[in-house]
Image (tube, rainbow, N blue to C red):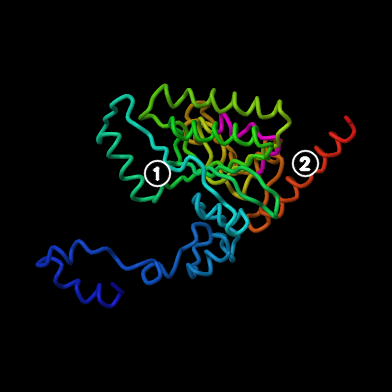
Amino acid sequence: MDLKEWFANRKNRKENKEVAKQPMPDEEYCALWTQCFQCREYLYTRDLRQNQLVCPKCHYHFRCGALDRIEYTADAGSFKEIDAEMQSSDPLNFIDTEAYPRRQEEASRKSGLKEAVITGVCTIGGNPCAIGCMDFGHFGGSMGSVVGEKVTRITEYAKQNHLPLIIVSSSGGARMQEGILSLMQLAKTSSALKDFSEAGGLYISLLSEPTFGGVTASFAMLGDVIIAEPGARIGFAGRRVIEQTIRQKLPSDFQTAEYLLKHGQVDMVVDRGQLKDRLASLIAFHARARTRSRAQAV
């Protein structure tokens, strides 16, 4: 159904239940324009997507979903997903205003994903690697049992196959609906990364908007190289919570990628358009160094 047909049927929506159930037309028709959150400029959505969701006016980096991230980062057609069918159960029979399974269904409907992280293998600039991409659009990118398990599995896969590992974080923290099981993922993922590091693997952690809570307290900040996108907010507790706790006003740029770079908590801040080339160069450099060290050992 195109835009003209949808509006033609609009008058009959109250009388005709079938017409009322029909969805709005595709983004191609309805979301022609996107307003930038920073400069408030209206941008042509197609041009914005071609620019990797970066505002051409003020350089604001929009949130990037897992599927878009893979498209922008991996070589075309090279990505192969691993553990695609894993989904969270309801171990605590958790109910707040809604049952947890109902919330999961709604999150999947909105995001089109089964969980808040996608893992797999790909090539970047011709260099093979393992990759995991989180999606804030699914349940706020919260880390439950499945997210922790998938991150652990892709780390172990990278170790077994001698691949560099890239994890793109975008999360509000641990998933409260899974309670202590969610919190235990911090220890599990950190332990897997320790084994990966001791085996000589390269782990690159990319922090995107936003990265908070238990993800920051575990695998997000354990990279051999930690890269952040411009303007990304990164921290453990939120700004408001910290201000209320210490009863002080924090700097305006507090918890931004630039603030963390200035204070030595991230290694570099890289524009999204340059990210693929930077990752490819880091992976290639590590591969050459590893080959050289093996040759010297022999």
Q: Classify mark 1: residues with Cα within 10 Å, few (<14), some (14-19) or many (20+).
A: some
Q: What element carries label 1?
A: loop
Q: Does the magenta stretch include residue 218?
A: yes
Q: Give the residues in magenta.
A: 216-227
Figure quadrant of residue 57? bottom right
Disc ID at residue 114? 1
Mark 2: which amino acid?
His
Disc ID at residue 286? 2
Q: Which of 210 and 178 is in front in this view?
A: 178
Please tell me which residue is depicted at 73% across the width and 45% down the height of the picture. 283
Q: Classify mark 2: residues with Cα within 10 Å, few (<14), some (14-19) or many (20+).
A: some
Sooner in the amino-acid sequence: mark 1 or mark 2: 1
Residue 266 pos. (x, y %): 68, 38
Please tell me which residue is depicted at 48% across the width and 40% down the height of the picture. 83
Q: Nearer the viewer, residue 210 or 101?
A: 101
Reply above or below: 52 against 179.
below
Q: How far apart are marks 1 and 2 (CA)?
A: 33 Å
Horizontal side, residue 105 vs residue 246: left or right? left
Quadrant in which the N terminus appears: bottom left
Q: What element carries label 2?
A: helix
